[in-house]
Image (cartoon, helix red, strand yellow):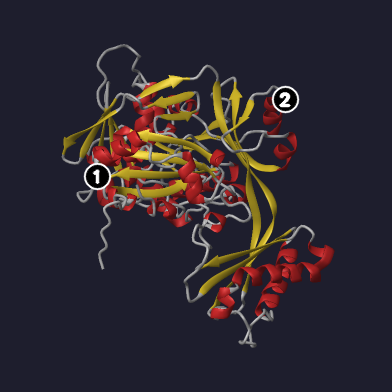
């Protein structure tokens, strides 16, 4: 049933709907890098302008300290955001679960804005 | 190499990149199409650190010998027939001496089988420990992000230390008239950029083109790691072209590739400087081609190379099993913790340094502690029990004990009393051999960019 409240917050949009690519990969054995490429320029601009992706948000999504978020870069030619994290365990060291780092993107899929 | 760096107009320089990694294969039809374009260079990157530390440490390739031989045979035969230099970097996957020798043996075999005679250039990427220790002493070593500071102890314990060579060793060998150059660990773009830079082409454009060609058709759409791509370097820009009709380059696919496996897409550091892409443009020029302009090479004040090395830390054994009991699945974390404690109690001092890991697929096997979903909804779990010991025997014993303890563990609330694990195989345990970890991933300042050992062999 649909309940409409005049004070209800605006419905949130999902990153999954506006992104063309969301992926993770090693950037060398000690870093994990996350790429978000947008379908449309306007969403890239919106994310850039409103700073929707912050170190704090990423840290919360992945349950890591903020200082382990190395950098967030806005790459104009691909209308993409790149976030680089510390690998908690270097690639292939004991305890690692993903040597290539290619399956660490899923928490981003749930991001709303 | 008769061109000078004069400002006379440079003819387009065509580079045929065969595949993303030597041994990943390419369709012969694409390769032939590439040859019909009359390339000036055939080059391929041979490796990556992606498959992890084992391959560098063990001196083994992560690619198949038969596949590498197939790729090389096509490349070398065509190169010699059409008088096009063939250049391979990071031979054998990791590019240390054993990997390079493995690749050279394949090249010699091809030469014998095909009755080919040519000048083979060989560049070693290995770095003597003394050189790194000396550099450490002089404070000319710095860690990359999140990498611990290098110590002499770590250098002593590390194996197969290599440095990523830049364009200089390639230029040296090509200038000596080598028709085929096989090199150890190399900066990925170097195999593509060395020759054109030596002929006077812009280093920023040449290196950026190399950065894209290094993955061949991966940067096209649909991407493929097993197909060729063509790069055409001109005086003030370069063009990317696919060599199979089902693919094309788009400004987006080309630009997106610049993000791949790097932490900052605007500044791509390499030996001797960085490629700056801030002023870069990607333009669709039709027929699946993209023109790129504005990439600039900014030389650094001192010449730094990236050094890589790994350290052997023990031996690994694993066992694979499934769990279907819902009561056990509900309590899996607690059960695994209790089993580990029990095993440690039984082994006592014998496994002081032994390590036990449970990879719980269906729960957090993929993301480990980064997994935000804490409670599994899965009706079955896949377990990989992993042990690491000082010797293979220690790892095996620790695994056997952990496996049997878990199989028969009487956890609280258990009603399936015959056994807790479903093993798909007999034997259930696998000895995995040596375990390595990356121990060196640093930058080292060198006086001469061509300090790498190289030699020429007449085949």
**Residue at horizontal 52%, vertical 16%?**
B301
Count neighbours of disc 2 (C-alpha within 10 A) and say few if under 14, some if 14 to 19, many if 20 or more: few
For the question of whether residue B348 can be seen, the reply is yes
Please state the horizontal and vertical placement of residue B280, each as a whole percent of the image: 31, 27
Q: Nearer the viewer, mark 2 or mark 1?
A: 2
**Circle 1 SS class:** loop
Please state the horizontal and vertical placement of residue A84, each as a whole percent of the image: 47, 40
**Residue at horizontal 63%, vertical 55%?**
A94
> Closest to the observer: B343 or B433?
B343
- Left or right, residue B309 beside residue B350: left
Count neighbours of disc 1 (C-alpha within 10 A) and say few if under 14, some if 14 to 19, many if 20 or more: many
- Left or right, residue B271 beside residue B338: left
Q: Are marks 2 and 1 in contact (CB under 8 Å)?
A: no
Please state the horizontal and vertical placement of residue B128, each as a whole percent of the image: 67, 33
Q: Earlier in the sequence, mark 2 or mark 1?
A: 2
> Closest to the observer: B66 or B402?
B402
The tag on residue B243 is 1
Note whether B30 is above or below B176 in the view shown.
Answer: below
Instruction: Count how many numbered circles sit on residues in the image.
Output: 2
* Pointer 1 chain: B
**Circle 2 SS class:** helix
* Pointer 2 chain: B
For the question of whether residue B180 can be seen, the reply is no
Please state the horizontal and vertical placement of residue B13, each as a whole percent of the image: 28, 28
Residue at the disc numbered 2? B137
**Residue at horizontal 60%, vertical 71%?**
B332
Which image quadrant is residue B388 in?
A: bottom right
């Amino acid at each position: 049933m649909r309940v409409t409240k005049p004070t209800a917050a605006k419905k949130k949009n999902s990153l999954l709907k506006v992104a063309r690519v969301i992926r993770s990969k090693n950037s060398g054995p000690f870093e994990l890098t996350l790429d978000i490429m947008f379908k449309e320029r306007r969403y890239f601009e919106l994310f850039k302008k409103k700073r929707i992706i912050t170190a704090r948000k990423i840290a919360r999504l992945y349950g890591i300290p903020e200082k382990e978020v190395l950098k967030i870069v806005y790459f104009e030619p691909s209308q993409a955001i790149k976030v680089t994290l510390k690998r908690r365990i270097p690639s292939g060291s004991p305890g690692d679960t993903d040597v290539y780092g290619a399956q660490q993107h899923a928490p981003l899929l749930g991001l709303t804005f | 190499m008769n061109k000078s760096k004069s400002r006379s107009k440079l003819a387009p320089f065509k580079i045929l990149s065969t595949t993303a990694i030597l041994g990943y294969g390419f369709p012969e039809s694409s390769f032939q199409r590439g040859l019909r374009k009359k390339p000036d260079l055939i080059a391929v990157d041979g490796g990556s650190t992606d498959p992890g530390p084992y391959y560098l440490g063990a001196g083994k390739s992560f690619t198949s010998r038969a596949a590498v031989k197939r790729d090389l045979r096509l490349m070398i035969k065509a190169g010699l027939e059409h008088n096009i230099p063939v250049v391979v970097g990071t031979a054998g996957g990791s590019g240390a001496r054993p990997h390079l020798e493995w690749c050279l043996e394949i090249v010699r075999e091809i030469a014998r089988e095909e009755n080919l005679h040519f000048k083979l250039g060989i560049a070693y990427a290995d770095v003597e420990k003394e050189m790194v220790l000396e550099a450490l002493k002089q404070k000319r070593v710095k860690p990359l992000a999140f990498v611990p500071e290098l110590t002499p102890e770590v250098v002593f314990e590390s194996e197969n230390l290599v440095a990523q060579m830049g364009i200089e060793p390639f230029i040296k060998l090509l200038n000596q008239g080598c028709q085929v150059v096989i090199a150890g660990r190399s900066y990925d773009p170097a195999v593509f950029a060395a020759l054109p830079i030596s002929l006077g082409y812009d280093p920023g454009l040449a290196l950026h083109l190399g950065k894209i060609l290094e993955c061949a058709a991966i940067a096209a759409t649909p991407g493929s790691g097993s197909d060729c791509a063509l790069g055409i370097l001109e005086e003030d820009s370069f063009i990317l072209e696919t060599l199979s009709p089902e693919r094309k380059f788009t400004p987006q696919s080309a630009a997106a590739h610049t993000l791949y496996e790097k932490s900052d897409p605007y500044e791509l550091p390499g030996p001797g400087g960085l490629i700056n892409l801030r002023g870069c443009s990607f333009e669709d020029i039709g027929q699946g081609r993209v023109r790129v302009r504005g990439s600039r090479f900014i030389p650094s004040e001192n010449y730094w190379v990236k050094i890589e090395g790994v350290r052997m830390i023990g031996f690994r054994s694993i066992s694979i099993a499934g769990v279907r009991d819902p009561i056990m699945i509900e309590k899996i974390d607690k059960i695994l913790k209790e089993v580990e404690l029990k095993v440690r109690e039984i082994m006592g001092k014998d496994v002081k340094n032994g390590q036990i890991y449970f990879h719980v697929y269906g729960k957090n096997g993929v993301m480990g502690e980064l997994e935000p979903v804490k409670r599994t909804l899965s009706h079955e779990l896949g377990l990989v029990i992993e042990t690491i010991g000082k010797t293979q025997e220690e790892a095996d014993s620790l695994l056997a004990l952990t496996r049997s303890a878990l199989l028969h563990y009487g956890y609280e609330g258990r009603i399936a009393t015959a056994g807790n694990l479903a093993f798909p195989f007999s034997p259930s345990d696998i000895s995995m051999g040596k375990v390595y970890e990356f121990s060196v991933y640093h930058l080292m300042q060198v006086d001469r960019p061509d300090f790498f050992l190289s030699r020429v062999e007449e085949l």
